[in-house]
Image: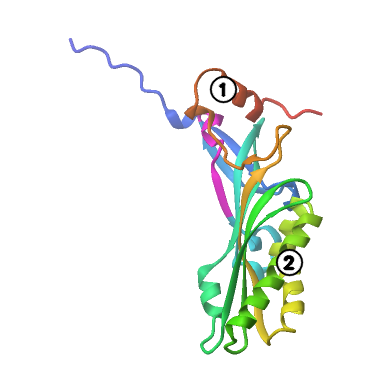
């Protein structure tokens, strides 16, 4: 007689559903759900959404946001802001011929110790000279670095994605040359504050580590029940 077949486990039934929530600056609204048979597999996962999905404002559909899972509390995936970027189709649509594009990339630090790289873009009404571009870029740098040092991470995120920062740059840079548009095109979280000082904002999955290092991270990122 043929040997009896071993029971086949249904891996799908073994999986548990987890709710992914936005960071506190976005009201911790649910971003979606995901199944997993091991919560450790969710640590480090990056979720992309748009500002339209969070606010319901269709005029913000071109603002793409990136969040990264850093902790599991019960059946909730807690995320951290990783960065943002404006849709490339949108950026192409606002660029015009016979005009200048002034771009600046700046590394800044917030009041509460977070390090970010911010990319800003200024579009002029007509072609301008190199000296005017340098003057505009200097204004961009001064405003972005000053405002970042005065704001917390949450305040800076709102200033970038809702237009406050770009409006301030527009108001000052238009004194140099007529402008058509200013956008904070992209941002990326580089470092986070810790008791031992700033450390890279890299989320390492405990599954990639071994020994005591893995055990320590597991205790940090997996919480069975949310503390009262």
Answer left or right for 48 relative to 3: right
* In magenta segment, residue 44: yes
Q: What residue range appears in magenta?
A: 37-48
Quadrant including the C terminus? top right
Measuring from the top left, give residue 224's x and y in whole percent: 67, 25
Would you place residue 15 above or below residue 87 in this image? above
- Which residue, given by chain and number where applicable, does mark 2 sit on? 142
**Farthest-out residue, front:** 131
User: Circle 2: is it few (<14), some (14-19), or many (20+) Cα within 10 Å?
Assistant: few
SS for dot 2: helix
User: Residue at (54%, 85%) from the top-left corner?
Assistant: 96
**Residue at 68% across / 40% down in the picture?**
198
For the view shown, which residue lies furthest in the left direction?
1
Q: Is 108 a magenta residue?
A: no
Residue under label 1, please give it. Answer: 213
Number of callouts in the render?
2
C-alpha gap between disc 1 and disc 2: 41 Å
93 or 137: nearer the viewer: 137
Q: Are marks 1 and 2 in contact (CB under 8 Å)?
A: no
Foreground: 128 or 94? 128
């Amino acid at each position: 007689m043929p040997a009896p077949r071993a029971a086949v486990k249904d891996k799908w039934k073994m999986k548990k559903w987890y709710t992914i929530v936005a960071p506190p600056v976005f009201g911790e609204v649910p971003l979606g759900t995901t199944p997993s048979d091991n919560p450790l597999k969710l640590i480090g996962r990056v979720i992309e959404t748009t500002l339209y999905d969070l606010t319901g404002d269709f005029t913000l559909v071109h603002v793409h946001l990136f969040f990264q899972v850093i902790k599991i509390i019960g059946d909730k995936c807690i995320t951290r802001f990783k960065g943002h970027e404006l849709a490339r189709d949108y950026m192409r649509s606002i660029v015009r011929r016979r005009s200048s594009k002034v771009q600046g990339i700046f590394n800044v630090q917030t009041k509460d110790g977070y390090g970010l790289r911010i990319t800003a873009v200024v579009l002029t009404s007509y072609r301008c000279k190199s000296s005017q571009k340098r003057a505009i870029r200097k204004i961009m740098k001064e405003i972005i670095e000053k405002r970042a040092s005065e704001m917390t991470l949450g305040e800076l995120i709102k200033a970038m994605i809702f237009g406050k920062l770009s409006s301030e740059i527009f108001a000052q840079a238009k004194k140099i040359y007529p402008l058509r548009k200013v956008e904070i095109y992209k941002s990326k979280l580089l470092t986070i504050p810790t008791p031992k000082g700033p450390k890279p904002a890299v989320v390492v999955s405990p599954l990639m580590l071994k020994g005591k290092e893995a055990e320590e991270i597991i205790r940090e990122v997996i919480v069975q029940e949310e503390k009262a």
